[in-house]
Amino acid sequence: MSISSSPNAAPVMDARHFRDALSQFATGVTIITTRLADNSFLGLTASSFNSVSLNPPLVLWSLNQAAKSMPVFSGNSHYVINILAADQAELAMKFAKPSDDRFAGVDYTLSPTGLPILAGVSAWFECHNRSRYPEGDHVIFVGEVECCDVRAQAPLVFHGGRFLSE
């Protein structure tokens, strides 16, 4: 195996350039949900989701360390990762924007531990909050999947700074 490097200088990289490059990787869109201490619900849109392991069943997602929701997600024992379907871009935007009640007008059922599973999602994973890893300006959450379900349908995809659907 031969490894060589380019004789050309590396392009200048700043935060905007890095974000632009990252935006070329198409991702699915999720809404992570959990419960607050007052029994109300918290949810946020995230595209940083990936599988980690089949045995044990592990998935990961990440959250900015400065997020107001960080103490809740760090401290709670469980959360649900809702994988959005192609027709749920409006829902993704609702949970991405600041709001006093993101769940107002949103249909959902409750998971085995009483957390919101959003209606119409392609799949959902109820996870035990297994571990957290601070890296850069984010925390990587690794969840051990305790139960999940799937309703195969076209996905909501985020690419180039916008939502794509079939």
Image (spheres, grey):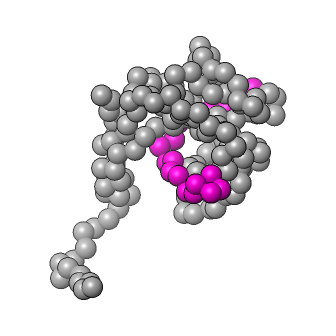
Query: Majority secondary structure of the magenta segment?
Result: strand
Look at the image and say whether residue 47 sits in the magenta stretch. yes
Query: Image height check: is 76 above or below 101?
Result: below
Look at the image and say whether residue 21 sits in the magenta stretch. no
Instruction: Locate the N terminus and report the quarter of the image it occupies.
Output: bottom left
Residue stretch in magenta: 40-57
- Identified at 71% across, 49% down, the residue is 129
Residue 94: percent from left, percent from top: 51, 25
- Farthest residue to the front: give it: 55
- Identified at 59% across, 13% down, the residue is 105
Direction from residue 49 to residue 153 in the image, left or right: left
Residue 51: percent from left, percent from top: 53, 52
- Farthest residue to the top: give it: 105
Looking at the picture, tell me which residue is in the foreground, 12 or 96: 96
Query: Image height check: is 152 above or below 139?
Result: above
Looking at the picture, tell me which residue is in the foreground, 33 or 1: 1
Instruction: Locate the C terminus and report the quarter of the image it occupies.
Output: top left
Q: Is residue 109 visible?
A: yes
Residue 72: percent from left, percent from top: 73, 42
Residue 158: percent from left, percent from top: 37, 39
Q: Is residue 139 visible?
A: no
